[in-house]
Image (cartoon, rainbow, N blue to C red):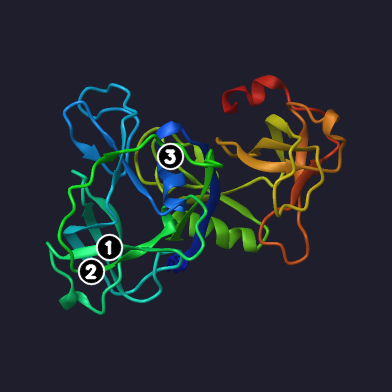
Amino acid sequence: MTPAPAPEVLSAPLAVEFPFTRSLGPVQSAFLTGLRERTVLGVRTADGRVLVPPVEYDPVTAEEIRDLVEVGTTGTVTTWAWNPAPRRGQPLTTPFAWALVRLDGADTALLHALDAPGPDAVRTGMRVRVRWAGERTGAITDIACFEPYESEPDPGGAPHDGEFADPVRGIVAPARLDYVYSPGRAQSRYIAALAGRRTVGERCPSCRKVYVPPRGACPTCGVATDEQVEVGPRGTVTTFCIVNIKAKNLDIEVPYVYAHIALDGADLALHGRIGGIPYDQVRMGLRVEPVWTEGGRYPDHYRPTGEPDADYDTYKELL
């Protein structure tokens, strides 16, 4: 018998994005508020070094440090790398250099963008200055970038009390990761089967357990899996939770129930939403079946089958 051709291994672009909100201590608050006011602050350690950006604890002694000093807005490039293709959200939209700049009066370097016409115009040791953003809010982006500027080094280091009107107390930093995800051979087969409203797992040749969704290898035995096994479509609720907080961009009214469901013939429970029953009537052992929407690529939710509840002993190993 000629084996069936292997399915195309799928891939898709994905993005994980969320806002990260954090409060600021006195040192970081002073640093970011200072940027808003076109002032760059560092912090002096017990051994006399000035750190920019400032930290709240001495990296050598771990002692708390609050000795703020004002440093210059000019400095020296200590090292750099050319960025020929800026990405979304980076400081400049045209090619630029990422540079470590030791500001005058500081003993450490600050990483930021350096606006230059090309890599031949950048060198270690070149003098630069801060280019301030037109609108400043109390963030590192208040420094729009650095730009070449010939000047003599300024020793700087004047003490600063860190006091500003309307200090910045917290920041929201957007975090985003763009990547291309490939589910691999096993899950590509699983997704292809779902398109035909079938649920297919893979059986371990050693322990004989059937895993859904398949992983391409048995998580217990560590051996590759290849034998496909169709499971379900019915299954048993093994455990569940009641969701009371509405998720952004998810058109489901709260409260609703999200459950682990052990499909008949599977040795691993998968996740699914439970519908067709009041949320407070969902229970362990409830027998359910998938509900598909027109054109859906996977079950929209699971609903009760009307069968008697499964005995606990039949699913206790899948909790």
Q: Secondary structure at mark 1?
A: strand
Q: Which residue is mark 3?
A: 30
> On the rendered structure, is 282 left or right of 184?
right
For disc 2, the neighbor class at 10 Å (few under 14, some 14 to 19, many from 20) is some
Question: Does 189 sit above or below residue 216?
Answer: below
Q: Quadrant of the N terminus?
A: bottom left
For disc 3, the neighbor class at 10 Å (few under 14, some 14 to 19, many from 20) is many
Residues at marks 3 and 2, CA–CA distance in whole angstroms: 27 Å
Q: Secondary structure at mark 3?
A: helix
Residue 286 circle label: none
Q: Which residue is mark 2?
A: 149
> On the rendered structure, is 74 left or right of 265?
left
Callout 2 touching callout 1 (CB < 8 Å):
yes
Name the amino acid, label 2. Answer: Tyr
Q: Which residue is mark 1?
A: 129
Q: Residue at x 27, y 41 (%)?
A: 158
Q: Quadrant of the C terminus?
A: top right
Residue 186 image position (x, y, % from top left)? 46, 54
For disc 1, the neighbor class at 10 Å (few under 14, some 14 to 19, many from 20) is many
Residue 50 image position (x, y, % from top left)? 23, 38
